[in-house]
Amino acid sequence: MSMRRSALAAFAVLLLAGLPVRSDDWGQWGRNAQHTGATNVVGQRAQDLLDDIIYDPFVEAEKADPDAGGDLLVHYQVPLLDNDDVFMEFKSGTFTDMEHWGTQTWNEKKLHWDNGHLSVKWTFQSDWKPVPFASLVTFNGPFWEPVFHAALAGSFVYVPGFGGSIFKVNKTTGAQVARISPFGALDPNTFVASPLTTDAAGNVYYNVMKLDATNPWDVDVVNSWLVKVSANGTVKTATYKSLTPGAPGGNDQCLGVFDTADLPWPPSPNAVPATVPCGTQRPGNNVAPAVAPDGTIYTVSVAHLWSRQSYIIAANSNLTPKWHTSLRDRFNDGCNVLLPPNGTPDGCRTGSHNGVDPAQNRPGAGRVIDDSTSSPVVAPDGSVFYGAYTRYNYAQGHMMKFAANGSFQTSYRFGWDDTPAVYAHDGTYSLLTKDNQYGGVGSYCNDETFCPSDRTPNNPAFPEAYFITRLNSNLVPEWRWQNTNTLSCTRDDSGHVTCVSDHPAGFEWCVNAPAVDRNGVVYNNSEDGGVYVIRNNGTLRDHIFLKLALGAAYTPISIASDGRILTQNDGHLFVVGDN
């Protein structure tokens, strides 16, 4: 959908005004309240490593944890930028293990760019704790460490706190101005469960969950809320139950999935799986609410006990419900479409209906899982995009587009842990997204007999490969740039780089929120340890290696007002540029 160029230009001004600090700074997840990841500056060349600061001292222990399998399963804050100041999370305390990640301490530090390096100006220690660790088996609750994420608003930085509270901190001095506690006494089972979002008026938005004390993920959620805090400290809350009237309730049944004993799926052309308890709707963990220029708030919910029953939600500025739309039954690209032919490895059972999700034998559902950081994005025409999870297409997920009235429009076959950037141009706009066609994972199940993990020989039309893709406003690819690097590299303390060729299909993109500059140039970080800068015509402009390949956390990237690039790798904050 396109707009007249004059209307789009006017909207672009509002879009950039969504950040309540300087219009070319980066104050929150996705840079502005619409989460577009777009800035009005021109990014510098990725030519030199200008600085390198460790913010997570526990990386080696985190990767060595038996649950991690050598990967860095941690979500991190985007570097927040205000002129020559950088605000970033820093971890301290003690790392015990992934299952007890709350023994760590989260801090917000202000760094100032001075004499060629970033120096610490103050440290604010928060008492925030993440929601508890959960099993990877059911996708109820997080297996990856949740994100601690502050936001800038005017003269203040707002920092997540304990028991559903947030801190209002003086941006200049680091002094606490106020603790805002919407739920009164600080309850250890009540959690700030999202990045903080700020709009042009200085309002702060975030999600809160209250969980069962002894069984947080297998017993229904106690309650959950969308919170709005005005610049003067006035608080409004709305339960997620109130925002999703008519959704299945905590004791209702949702359609389950087939048993592994019945592989290949579906067991027969008209088979129907048994039902499972739904649980009450609550926010997806790590979902940052988005705010449109007209004040509409967009967020995402999920049934507490079942990730396949999820909604995208629009709320009015006073937190009353506007609409909610199910993510269920939206995709028709499963059996015999994205998957190999029925009856072949990685394909569905012979005779299966075309397009269905083999796990449920019905159209695919966009799933909201708690190991994702995907957040809603508001586009220049008012459309809303969300990156949902789907397992049946090699765990790639789908990018979903909804109209401003909540009607589902279309989708693209990748969306997992992805908040795309939006580039407004020529009377329309494009989305910039990672586009991972993962290897090492079967199409729809974990059984090597029926879903072999080497997809390339079994599905040569849809092989393992890793792209940055630009989509038009209707999610049709405009161009794709493939990372074909095969080299795993490390940089030692003296700066010497050693490499070995061990990734014949290339490396996945580990950016979860890319950045796009004024010229449509997109900035991304890859699991090969590099930052890649791709022109708006889909050709590579720059590449620089940071530190370490493999096991990289999914991390966001930001661009400073002078064009310097701030990116992350292996628990390090890197500043990249050409001056």
Image: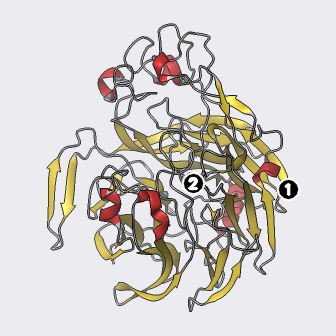
The residue located at (76%, 73%) in the rendering is: 184
Q: Quadrant of the image for the N terminus?
A: top right
Amino acid at circle 2: Val
Q: Nearer the viewer, residue 5 or 213?
A: 213
Q: Position of residue 180 (x, y in %)?
A: 72, 77
**Percent position of residue 118, x then y:** 38, 84
Q: Quadrant of the C terminus?
A: bottom left
Q: Are marks 2 and 1 in contact (CB under 8 Å)?
A: no
* Residue 406 shows up from this direction: no
Residue 547 appears anywhere in the view: yes
At 29% from the left edge and 63% from the top edge, which residue is drawn?
60
Image: 119 above or below 38:
below
> Which residue corresponds to the image point at 35% horizontal and 54% vertical from the top-left?
526
Q: Is residue 354 above or below residue 24?
A: above
Q: Quadrant of residue 194?
A: bottom right
Which residue position is annotated with label 1?
A: 320
Q: Residues within 10 Å of mark 2 (few under 14, many from 20)?
A: many
Judging by the rendered image, the residue that carries numbered circle 2 is: 422
**Is 230 or 371 nearer to us in this picture?**
371
Quadrant location of residue 524? Answer: bottom left
Q: Sort mark 1 into few (<14), some (14-19) or many (20+) by Cα contacts within 10 Å.
A: some
- Residue 114: image location, x then y, percent: 39, 89
